[in-house]
Image (tube, rainbow, N blue to C red):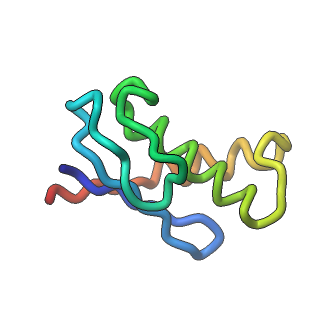
Amino acid sequence: MATYKTRIYGDEIEISANFSWASDQIMGDLAGGRQVADFRHSPQAAMREALRQYIVACGDDPDDEEYDNVIEDAVSEMTEEEG
């Protein structure tokens, strides 16, 4: 299992899963009981969705153009910790 972390607006977002197992449930800041297969084994895609959910929870629309770079910057700064 690996844990991926990044920061957005000073808050840490974290997801954990074994991204080689399609049926592994992603834990952490990604709501909805999603599995690795839902993101085609891509931790970056899963993190993008967790960041989008964070933006929605803050009361904003992640589809607004202003968030494209914010999300991509956070994904590019994502770190991995093996566990």
Out of 73 and 41, give the one closest to the viewer. Answer: 41
Q: Tell whether 81 sits left or right of 72.
A: left
Q: Position of residue 17 (x, y in %)?
A: 28, 47
Residue in the image at 38% along x and 36% along y: 35
Residue in the image at 35% along x and 34% along y: 36
In this view, the residue farthest toward the front is 33
Q: Position of residue 13 (x, y in %)?
A: 49, 64
Out of 3 and 7, give the one closest to the viewer. Answer: 3
Q: Is residue 55 above or below residue 35?
A: below
Q: Tell whether 51 sits left or right of 35.
A: right
Q: Is residue 39 above or below residue 75?
A: above
Residue in the image at 28% along x and 56% along y: 3
Out of 35 and 52, give the one closest to the viewer. Answer: 35
Quadrant containing the C terminus in the rendered view: bottom left
Q: Is residue 54 above or below residue 2?
A: below
In this view, the residue farthest toward the bottom is 10
- All told, the count of numbered labels is 0
In this view, the residue farthest toward the left is 83
Q: Position of residue 27 (x, y in %)?
A: 37, 55
Q: Is residue 7 above or below residue 4?
A: below
Out of 18 and 42, give the one closest to the viewer. Answer: 18
Q: Tell whether 18 sits left or right of 70.
A: left
